[in-house]
Image (cartoon, rainbow, N blue to C red):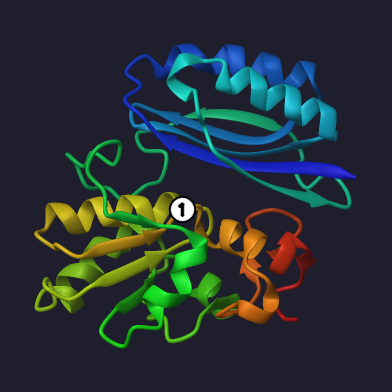
Amino acid sequence: MIAVSAFYKFVHLPQFAELRPMLLDAAKARGIRGTILLAAEGINGTIAGAPDDLVAMMVFIRAIPAFAGLESKESHAESMPFQRMKVRLKKEIVTMGVQGLDPAHVVGTYVAPEDWNALISDPDVLVIDTRNSFEFAAGTFAHAVDPQTKSFGEFPAYVQRELGAQKDRPIAMFCTGGIRCEKATSYLRSQGFGKVYHLKGGILKYLEVIPPEQSLWQGSCFVFDEREGLGHGLEIVKPED
């Protein structure tokens, strides 16, 4: 079995380029594959390897002071889902293209998976899927809105076009692992939205901890590797299933 870890952290990281060689060398030494993105705003990655090697790699990453307390979502694959190991330097760890956002300090209210059902079942709450349309088509939460974006960079235009008159309405957002919806809440806060919430740990954490019989999730959660989609318990499923 191959273990898979998905993680991110918004943190001020001005010397991020200096971390690339040490992370790449540590991953290769442990036979780890996948992708890690580094930017001045933090780290974002999905990596895989033998269970013991992946645990050792995550211990190594968390030992870097900026990444202390880094949370991750653990799943598995039947075979290695990545071809090689990449550590890339980026302008943003998730690309929105809006300058001046500070998700490390200014975001919406985190909602634990255990409290998510109650929030999105409130008819006054607008529930928005911040992922792209093809991800929405594979699976989403009941009554969620599809912004019909092809990339996350289109999300600000959606907000300006569709949400400008709803700044006082409670808005709950979600995404795969938490990173896009966290940055989306930072953007909404910067635009004057006051009641902004997002699912802590994203869909992956929800599927990990919420039993199917209590779930409001429908379909599969698309993931960007050879597994294609995950279901409850983070078991591998095909999106068309």
- Residue 132 visible in rendering: no
In the image, residue 19 above or below residue 69: above
Seen at 68% across and 71% down, the residue is 211
Q: Whole-percent x and y of residue 70? A: 52, 32
In this rendering, would 192 be left or right of 230?
A: left
User: Which quadrant would the C terminus be assigned to in this image?
Assistant: bottom right
Q: Whole-percent x and y of residue 210? A: 62, 67
Helix or strand or loop: what does disc 1 sit on? loop
Seen at 21% across and 42% down, the residue is 101
Number of other residues with Cα within 10 Å of mark 1, as a class: few under 14, some 14 to 19, many 20 or more: many
Q: Whole-percent x and y of residue 147? A: 35, 75
Q: Whole-percent x and y of residue 87? A: 57, 27
Residue tagged by mark 1? 178
Seen at 19% across and 65% down, the residue is 195
In the image, residue 16 above or below residue 241: above
Seen at 88% across and 52% down, the residue is 78
Disc 1 marks a residue whose amino acid type is Gly
In the image, residue 212 above or below residue 184: below
Name the one closer to the observer, 231 or 26: 231
In the image, residue 23 above or below residue 177: above
